[in-house]
Image (cartoon, rainbow, N blue to C red):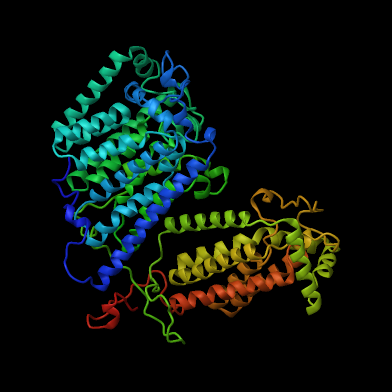
Amino acid sequence: MANAEGSGRPAEAFGPTAVGPATPAQARLRAARLALWLVVAVLASRQVAVVLRTPRGERLTDLETWVGPYGVLHVNGSLYDSTRFTGTPFAGLVLKPLTRTAEQALGWGWTFGTLLLVAALGLVAARALPQPVSRRTSLLAAPVAISLLMLSLPVRNTLWLGQTSIIPVLLVLLGCFAVRGRRAGGLLIGFAAALQPTVLLFVPLLWFTGRRTAALTTAGTFVACTAVAWVAMAHDSYMYWVHHMAGTGLGGEADDLANQSLHGALLRLGLSGPLEVTLFLLFGVGVAALGLRRAVRYARDGQLLLAVAITGCAAIAVSPTAWQHQLLWVVLAVVGRAGKRASDRYVWPVAVVLVMTLPATIMLPDMAALYIVRDNVVLLAAVAAAAVVPFLCRTSPYYRSPVPTAYAPPVPARFRRVPLLPFLRRVLTRPSVLLELLLIRVTYAAYQQVRLGVTADRATAERHGREIHALEKWLSIDIERRANHAVVKVDWLRSFFDFYYASFHFAVPLTILAVLYVRRPVDYRWARSALGLATLLGLLGFWLYPLAPPRLMPGLGFIDTVHGVQDFSQPDYGVMTEVTNQYAAMPSLHFGWSLWCGIVIAALAPKWWMKALGLLHPLFTASAIVATANHWVLDAVGGAVIVGAGFGLTYLLSGPRAASETAAGTRPRQEPVDSPLAEAGGTRN
């Protein structure tokens, strides 16, 4: 299947061949390549350290089920009596002679062996990129591919559990791209199918792409290996292929979240019995047929690696059980190109990287309505790759030359060295909504994790609280207690501030971002960048200066109007107590985000009354955080400082805000050929 249709490249493309001094561009490329290989080394070292630092009974737990004196491969009965061993009988036959070695090298040997397999997989995948590729891409592809594999959840789970699921994927790639001769390739793929039966889905791919010798060899190798295992282990073979119906029911419960197959998804939806089996067969056949049709088309187009990835994704969906460590095919689907615009070209790769490197709980919020998506996010990615995403063919004019991104004309800055990063030009078109939602969600989840992780002991937080209170008294701005007790006496005012504090913190910024995204995409990017930088500075403040808010300062007489009387040793923040750092008060992001809202509205609103109304939001928020005893006055000052710094950094890095007439739907006029803007790739309205 290998190299005739343009997948793969000559060996000399992996290294420079020119003789003589390197140009500055070549020097930068070598530096980037060296840096990426250093990243690979760091990631590999980290993976080894994580595994080996884990106590013996908590690491490589799947590996320990079939090695050692009581492992399933040492028992006299069936391998499947305990359902712990999920491999095929042929896998048991192959692994049995290795159990003594694995038992002695449990840890170092197995972990380093797995890392070598990951490195080989990344090298083969980089070698298989469809032509044409630039020299820069060919040089950087291997370390990028290995790094992505190292970070992916399937590889991390494989290293943690001690699984062998990388081997079938590597055998398929070797059979398709590395060995010469279709029979040799078919032997490797058939051997992979004997270890993981869903690999048989590659037989029709080989057949319909004209590689019938390889297809027949694959099928014959699978049959021969299975027959050998049946002769040597008849009872085990019967248990696996007949009693367990090709492994169904082995391992964990089929409705477990780790099973990212259509069968597992249907079970999680509450379906069972004949209805579930019927739907699984219907959906499975549909995904397999559509996936194979698309894979054949892309294989004939010369994108063999994408065709292999699509077939593997279809195999994930149709398998009765597809555990997390068996989902590497989705990672390989990152090579597909989707989108006619240059700005859309990153949507699919970023989505795949996020899905395959982050837990589903970070990808989507903890909302019951989204559980169906969150619990099956990897399956949805596999089905999308197999049957939905419209990857571009190499014959498409957009494959190598997507519609270029339109940029706003540069706005002169007041300072000579602004912007510091000239490549951060103002983009006219709005970004992909899917990509923005993914990035906003992941960023907020990271913000939550960092904010929760930056904790301090109560004594330190209260000491800082006394420092802030003393400084406010010296400045004569210690109004928190008077405001707090005054509001408590007025029921409607207390209810108003409680509601405002609890309800508008997220709603208003998200609403503003949504309006800007739809109506003014250039200003959306400007405002989003300022908000993101301000939030990062806020997290730095939480880390450097953990602070007890007034409501958690004993002896000062504050009343928590939102959450009620507090136990200072175990403060309560309502339903968010377990996921919120109680001492993340300086700076106040409540006020900081509201001030950001006010500045954005004041800068962009077309009418004066809208600007004035927008400025009321930070005023009400400042009143609410003080009156409810959730922040000191100086916390609000800190929030104002980080917001100012966020806008200032945005200005320094990317220059002044682009003109407001560059709104959504405006079609920029192309610059004349001799225009400096046209030479730089920019456009003007």
Q: Which quarter of the rendering shows the N terminus?
A: top left
Image vertical order of residue 616 relative to residue 90, above or below: below
- In the image shown, does 410 or 43 lie closer to the viewer? 43
- In the image shown, does 443 or 507 lie closer to the viewer? 443
On the image, the x and y values in percent for residue 449 come to 58, 53
- In the image shown, does 559 or 57 lie closer to the viewer? 57
On the image, the x and y values in percent for residue 517 come to 47, 65
On the image, the x and y values in percent for residue 420 come to 43, 78
Image vertical order of residue 177 relative to residue 83, above or below: below
Q: Is residue 125 visible from the viewing direction of this image?
A: yes
Q: Is residue 383 visible from the viewing direction of this image?
A: no
Q: How many marks?
A: 0
Image vertical order of residue 676 relative to residue 501, above or below: below
Left or right of residue 139: residue 19: left
- In the image shown, does 210 or 341 lie closer to the viewer? 210
Q: Quadrant of residue 304?
A: top left
Q: In which quarter of the image is residue 446?
A: bottom right
Image vertical order of residue 321 relative to residue 40, above or below: above
On the image, the x and y values in percent for residue 359 come to 49, 46
Left or right of residue 210: residue 293: right
Q: Quadrant of residue 289?
A: top left
The residue under the point 22% across, 56% down is: 14
Q: Which quarter of the rendering shows the C terminus?
A: bottom left
The residue under the point 43% across, 51% down is: 354
Residue with the most extreme front position: 104
Left or right of residue 481: residue 173: left
